[in-house]
Image (cartoon, rainbow, N blue to C red):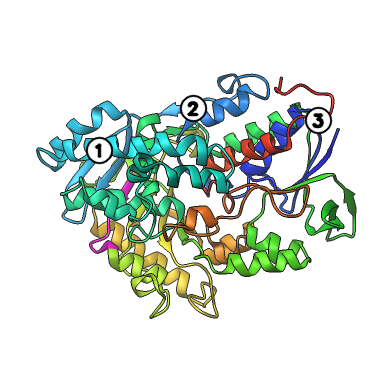
Amino acid sequence: MSRVVVIGAGVGGLASAARLASLGHDVTVLEQSDVIGGKLGTIEHDGFLFDTGPSLVTMPYVFAELFGQTGAPLESVLELRRLEVACRYRFADGTELDMPGRVEEIPGALDAALGSGTGRQWSRFLERSGKVWDIARGPFLESPITAAGIARLAANPLSLAKVAPWRSLRGFGEQDLADPRLRALLDRYATYTGSDPRRAPSALATVPFAEQAYGSWYVPGGLWRLGAAIADRARECGARIRTGVDVTRILQEGARVSGVETADGERIAADVVVANADAETVYGKLLSSEGARRAARSHAKLDPSLSGFVLLLALDGLDEAAFEHGEATHHRVLFAEDYDAEFDAIFGVGGQAQSGPKPVERPTIYIAAPEDPEIVPGPGSGAWFVLVNAPRHDPEHGVDWNEPGLAEQYAESLLELMAERGVDVRDHVRWMRIRTPADLERETRSPGGSIYGTASNGAKASFLRPANRQPVEGLYLVGGSSHPGGGLPLVTLSAAIVAEMIGPAEGRGSTAP
């Protein structure tokens, strides 16, 4: 039996703990916060409950596999509810599209909302992106990145042509998408990895494919329950979860890990350490070897991902509110008039930081407005999560989100912009909380509040993301800043990859109970 310490109780760390404990390892999870979940956080006040991180579950089979391979099936512990309307999109020209939650209904909905032929354009795009999915899913999303895997792709001309790694996501879509609104729709998916669609690789075309092929899902009562269910499963399998424990150093004996040290001076021995922490933090703060310093220098060359500026709106009187086109919708996206200007502001002009990042004047606005009686104090109330893409917190070279008055002024401008785009809730706000990239950095220790660690900007970015197995023997990375990337399904897949690498405890079979 190996002694395993998991640093961090985000979804990646909890899923790793559940899998490794089910394989017979002695697992302890150490979380610096007083609560579990990492970026899958929650705030409850005055009868309103908010998810403060992810608001959508995609690729539900990933979670079904996690629970099925560690004990009782997912449906026995948690309800996932499919959304029949995945999202209502309002484009810059004012047209609106209710995107169906079932892929077979999408072409007709596009033709009806955006004009004849747009459904066929999107179908052609999904057909090509589905082929990329088929190529990338096993070797890259569900396996560790290896030189051999990259070489196999490069050696197969047919696969290489379909993936087209030399082409940007935007360039990949332009082959099929003549309608500018469909191009804006595709551009948005680059932000799911914190990236710029003009520089993100074509392989990210798999993101809209997976979302639409497998549907959009919600957890009644809030997505925080998914993290809680994974934590419960880890405990059932024998893992211990300790909160309020700040790991300050990963200990080594020679070339391998020997445990961790906490801020209180406690030393916990371990044969294996799984770090569910940002790779920059691991290299820069938790390790002290020359190898770590080399890794830190290499990691510093990658673009950090974008961050987010969030409003949590506790609303009343929504049964009397008059929004464009009436009824409430779980997810809304109000597109910017100039998407390129948005990415220029976040990453710097042309993505090269020539003028320095700055808050976006007229950003695309995402609204999660669940119709869920479990998260509000009563009828007519709403717990709305409003998010815009934002540059990371970087007082020295970019935006200082702690600057007095900045967050409050920006929040008011976003409420006005929502109203201008047909969603005016200003007279219904009981109270509002603001969460800036600086807040995200403080609460989750993600440097700068970068949501996904590093961005997937550039053809090689996906291959340069920190590997799950580290040069220090017995050390593994899991979570959004490591392979295969950020987002609930991918961090859960990273846990599966790490568990497969570590394998069952000595004397155990090759399969979990």
Residue 479: percent from left, percent from top: 61, 47
Residue at point 60%, 41% (across, down): 494
Distance between mark 3 and mark 1 Cα atoms: 49 Å
First along the sequence among labels 3 and 1: 1
Mark 1, secondary structure of its residue: strand
Specify the quadrant that holds the C terminus: top right
Looking at the image, tell me whether mark 2 or mark 3 is earlier in sequence order.
Answer: 2
- Between 187 and 160, the residue placed more toward the observer is 160
The magenta span reads 332-339
Determine whether label 3 and label 1 are within 8 Å by CB.
Answer: no
Q: Amino acid at mark 1?
A: Asp
Residue 420 shows up from this direction: yes
> Foreground residue, 453 or 290?
290
Tell me if residue 334 is in the magenta stretch: yes
Residue ID for mark 3: 505
Query: Given the image, on which type of amino acid does mark 3 rest?
Result: Ala
The residue identified by callout 2 is: 80
Q: Nearer the viewer, residue 28 or 166?
A: 166
Q: Which residue is mark 1?
A: 98
Instruction: Tell me if residue 432 comes above or below residue 360 in the rendering.
Output: above
Q: Is residue 488 magenta?
A: no
State the image coordinates of residue 264 (x, y, percent, origin top left): 87, 59
